[in-house]
Image: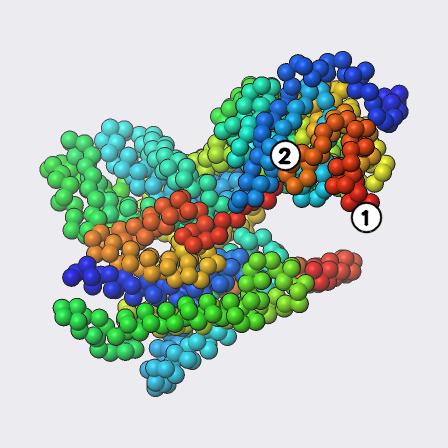
């Protein structure tokens, strides 16, 4: 029996190892191709965003797949991470000479603030259940977007200056910056003139880091408690699991990773608006998670990568590409979830399976 | 083998095999005027009972009598509207279900509630959650405490599973187990929290006579091995009369009789409320 | 006076939300799904009525009827093709499918009618003058339509056979089926009603804001769902109350903190749900252990 368990443990460890190796291999290949100039311009430009979306998908999978709570406002945490990261980088660029260190600091700051917001959102929200929780996370995502849209931030020799443009009458002048000051975030115009610090290597390291955090968490005591809550909250409570503590733990970890991804994303562009992180972005990441498989981190990585490249690759179809995307999305969901379609696919692919699948479908149809 | 034959002889004179049991010592569980109202209806009212440290107690009554509600009250899934519960002399008022578990009450559910997508072993390890204490960061960074405690948890989980002949299923998905094994796994998971009192909600439901006999052995084995009290809700009278030392009968949320199996069997109120009704079925 | 006119435009906006929310709440009550495509049905309703009036020269009432007809058919088709096969699937799969349908409708509209915003004329001109206060007739029409629909739906669900079947299905589909109710047909009928209401809402929404583009429906759709949750999902008076309140809050917030109007609306929703987790008029459901 000891052997039996060892097998189980090894299986998980092996699966994790394959994930790490796969990500590393893709990184090495892409870096080589890029250094030889064999990547198209558009793909080259997408390497960092792909890393960000992968981290977003992995972190959202922690909330949706591992914790089992539907969040529709994940882009909000990315947004907090992006703008706090940009502010940190812009303020410290005179003090920290090394760009990689500056980027690291910005990502830590982004993760930290996203975690704080995650805690503030999670404390009230996680008491709700199911679709109510979903709609409230959506609401928080929109609130974060609107608040950042009003935000004015500047930096000068006297320090940071903040102002809020709630009524549409404030602008950069309201910050009262000194001569040497720079405006970092200008309300609805967002951040402009940001130094582009993000690199593909940093993106790769962040992906690996996110994977280590999430995969190791899943194989630990805390992760088991989180998954137990997902499978049966009442039973988990009955064996002494503190519901609030572990829900928050998962939610805040997820927010922090999204924040780090946001900081990387924000420092990849010279200008960025808060509207970039709207409801559609949250949904986009959720689609990665669901198509990749709930709780399946490797699936999230693949789905995020493929679905970020796909719209670009479909560019020649121009107007039709989003329509195609929508149809593919619907068909994939139907094919993987509809008992009748599943049966039809089985019939088409395997004559041996035919009997089984047909009976299964009839039974389900009869129920 | 001798233990098995012995437990099948019913009823067992409890004092003979459990020297520790002494009702005058502090009981493991005591309820005082326990009650709950749902919208004006007294689902449970004035429920008083005491369970000794290693007693096997039965809670019986017709369908809808409020038995499961009593379990939900004992584990603070429902907050009582009146009365109090003492576990080892300490009141559970204001505690969460998880805290009550840490005070020493573990339970199973009438409709099985396993962590279906986790393996059998992980189900037990979730039960062992509070027997380990390495933190969140130790788990992510895989510090030495992670490796040490995970190894211990792994061994303990297999020991517990082995006790119920389930060690070979350790890496199976809990949701894929056959019904009987799921019921046993729920018990193992509850035992993993090292409770002082184990609550079993209809453990024999859906079992055939030979499975029920095995369950009776197991319940005795649990008490003898872990030296804990067991309280069970059950409709199978052979099981209840066979292994319970004390029985409480409820109807319409109130206690109508208390006593040992012989007293219950001959109690006219019980026959009218419960046994009589069962014969009609 | 400014406050009063904000209040009136809030009630008007709230009535539109309420009409959408009524459809949403019925669909959610019975299918237990977040139908993110609902907002896009509103947009389709807007375009169909626009085309009917401008290209086909229909009178207003005929344009509205045509929009209702098209949306009803659209609702039934969407339900039958995309949602019915997923009746037993996990709710997340249905949600993603609904998002797919939403993208599909938006991008189809983009291809058919192009991205540029169309100017949608008010379907009723003129306004009522009460002293200093001016109330456009379209506002009065919107509020009246909303009240009529709310009362009509209440009577329909409590008195008619189909309405009772709908309530039975939203309570317990299995039991409803055992009582001889055709669950699939009942769900289709609910989608049909919800979509017809969305068409009306589309016409009223466009004629209050005078604009129409492929994403017109998204935000009102989300807000209407918020309104339904706010009032207590599954409750018809709740959807009405939630819609009106939401519209008024939004309109007043817009007057004082224009950049944060949406944030204020969502903040109120969060507060309400934290205090009353099942909404203002929702039923509290105790989890069975």
Q: Which residue is mark 2?
A: B71
Q: Quadrant of residue B8?
A: top right
Residue A240 in the image, given as x and y percentages of width and height:
57, 29
The residue shown at (61%, 63%) is: C85
Q: Position of residue B272 (x, y in %)?
A: 77, 41
Which of A125/A290 is in front?
A: A125
Label 2: which secondary element: helix
- Determine which of the numbered discs, if any, sits on residue B280 in the image: 1
Whether C22 is drawn above or below B145: the answer is below
Residue A307 visible? The answer is yes
Mark in front: 1 vs 2 = 1
User: Can you tell which quarter of the image residue C143 is in?
Assistant: bottom left
- x then y, percent, for residue B86: 58, 23
Residue at the image point whose x is 42% and y is 61% from the top: C237
- Tell me the distance, in whole angstroms, between the alpha carbons under discs 1 and 2: 27 Å
A262 or B156, which is in the foreground? B156
Q: Chain of mark 2?
A: B
Viewer-proximal residue, C136 or B120? C136
> For this rendering, which residue is in front, C31 or A296?
C31
């Amino acid at each position: 029996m000891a052997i039996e368990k060892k097998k189980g443990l090894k299986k998980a460890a092996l699966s994790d190892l394959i994930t790490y190796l796969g990500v590393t291999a893709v990184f090495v290949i892409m870096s080589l191709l890029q250094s030889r100039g064999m990547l198209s311009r558009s793909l080259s430009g997408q390497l960092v965003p792909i890393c960000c979306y992968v981290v977003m998908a992995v972190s959202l999978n922690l909330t949706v797949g591992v914790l089992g709570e539907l969040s529709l406002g994940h882009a909000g945490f990315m947004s907090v991470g992006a703008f706090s990261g940009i502010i940190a980088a812009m303020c410290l660029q005179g003090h920290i000479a090394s760009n990689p260190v500056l980027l690291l600091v910005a990502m830590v700051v982004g993760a930290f603030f996203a975690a704080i917001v995650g805690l503030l959102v999670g404390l009230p929200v996680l008491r709700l259940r199911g679709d109510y929780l979903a709609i409230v996370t959506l609401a928080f995502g929109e609130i974060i977007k609107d608040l950042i849209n009003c935000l004015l931030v500047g930096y000068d020799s006297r320090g940071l200056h903040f102002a809020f443009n709630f009524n549409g009458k404030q602008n950069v002048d309201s910050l009262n910056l000194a001569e040497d000051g720079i405006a970092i975030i200008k309300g609805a115009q967002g951040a402009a003139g940001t130094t582009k610090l993000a690199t593909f290597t940093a993106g790769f390291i962040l992906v690996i880091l996110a994977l280590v955090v999430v995969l190791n968490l899943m194989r630990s005591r805390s992760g088991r408690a989180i998954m137990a809550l997902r499978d049966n909250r009442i039973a988990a409570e009955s064996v002494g699991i503190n519901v609030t503590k572990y829900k928050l733990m998962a939610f805040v970890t997820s927010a922090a990773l999204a924040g780090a991804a946001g900081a990387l994303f924000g420092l990849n562009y010279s200008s960025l608006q808060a509207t970039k992180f709207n409801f559609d972005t949250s949904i986009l990441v959720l689609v990665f998670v669901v198509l990749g498989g709930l709780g399946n981190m490797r699936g999230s990585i693949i789905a995020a990568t493929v679905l970020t490249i796909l719209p670009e690759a479909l560019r020649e179809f121009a107007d039709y590409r989003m329509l195609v995307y929508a149809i593919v999305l619907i068909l994939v969901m139907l094919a993987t979830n509809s008992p009748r379609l599943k049966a039809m696919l089985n019939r088409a692919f395997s004559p041996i399976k035919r009997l089984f699948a047909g009976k299964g479908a009839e039974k389900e149809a009869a129920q | 083998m001798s233990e098995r034959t012995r437990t099948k002889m019913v009823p067992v004179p409890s004092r003979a095999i459990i020297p520790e049991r002494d009702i005058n010592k502090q009981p493991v569980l005591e309820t005082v005027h326990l009650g709950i109202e749902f919208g004006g209806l007294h689902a449970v009212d004035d429920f008083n009972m005491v369970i000794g440290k290693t007693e096997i107690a039965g809670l019986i009554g017709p369908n809808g009598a409020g038995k499961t509600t009593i379990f939900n009250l004992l584990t603070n899934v429902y907050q009582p509207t009146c009365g109090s519960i003492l576990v080892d002399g300490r009141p559970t008022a204001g505690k969460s279900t998880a805290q009550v578990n840490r005070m020493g009450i573990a339970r199973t559910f009438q409709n099985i509630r396993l962590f279906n997508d986790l393996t059998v072993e992980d189900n037990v390890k979730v039960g062992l959650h509070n027997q380990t204490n390495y933190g969140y960061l130790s788990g992510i960074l895989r510090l030495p405490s992670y490796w040490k405690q995970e190894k211990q948890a792994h061994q303990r989980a297999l020991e517990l599973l082995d006790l119920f002949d389930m060690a070979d299923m350790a890496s199976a998905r809990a949701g894929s187990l056959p019904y009987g094994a799921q019921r046993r796994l729920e018990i193992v998971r509850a035992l993993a929290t090292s409770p002082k009192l184990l609550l079993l909600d209809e453990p024999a439901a859906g079992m055939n006579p030979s499975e029920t006999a095995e369950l009776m052995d197991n319940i005795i084995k649990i008490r003898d091995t872990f030296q804990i009290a067991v309280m069970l809700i059950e409709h199978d009278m052979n099981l209840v009369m066979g292994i319970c030392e004390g029985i409480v009968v409820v109807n319409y949320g109130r206690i109508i009789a208390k006593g040992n199996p012989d007293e219950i069997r001959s109690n006219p109120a019980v026959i009218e409320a419960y046994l009589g009704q069962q014969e009609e079925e | 006076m400014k406050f009063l006119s904000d209040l009136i435009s809030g009630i008007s906006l709230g009535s539109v939300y309420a009409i959408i929310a009524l459809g949403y709440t019925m669909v959610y009550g019975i299918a237990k799904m977040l139908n993110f495509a609902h907002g896009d049905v509103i947009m389709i309703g807007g375009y169909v009525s626009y085309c009917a009036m401008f290209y086909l020269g229909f009178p207003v009432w005929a344009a509205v009827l045509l929009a209702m007809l098209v949306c009803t058919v659209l609702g039934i088709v969407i339900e039958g093709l995309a949602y019915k096969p997923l009746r037993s699937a996990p709710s997340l799969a249905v949600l993603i499918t609904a998002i797919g349908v939403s993208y599909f409708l938006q991008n189809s509209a983009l291809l058919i009618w192009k991205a540029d915003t169309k100017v949608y004329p008010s379907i009723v001109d003129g306004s009522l003058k009460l002293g200093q206060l001016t109330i456009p007739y379209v506002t009065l029409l919107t509020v009246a339509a909303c009240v009529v629909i709310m009362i009509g739906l209440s009577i329909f669900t409590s008195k008619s056979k189909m309405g009772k079947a709908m309530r039975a299905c939203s309570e317990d589909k299995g039991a409803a089926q055992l009582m001889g109710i055709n669950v699939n047909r009942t769900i289709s009928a609910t989608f049909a009603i919800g979509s017809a209401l969305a068409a009306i809402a589309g016409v009223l929404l466009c004629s209050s804001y005078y604009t129409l583009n492929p994403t017109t429906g998204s935000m009102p759709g989300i807000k209407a769902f918020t309104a339904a949750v706010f009032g207590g999902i599954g409750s018809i008076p709740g959807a009405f109350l939630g819609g009106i309140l939401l519209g008024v809050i939004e309109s007043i917030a817009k007057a004082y903190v224009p950049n944060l109007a949406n944030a204020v609306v969502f903040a109120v929703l969060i507060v309400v749900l934290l205090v009353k987790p099942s909404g203002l008029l929702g039923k509290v459901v105790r989890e069975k252990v």
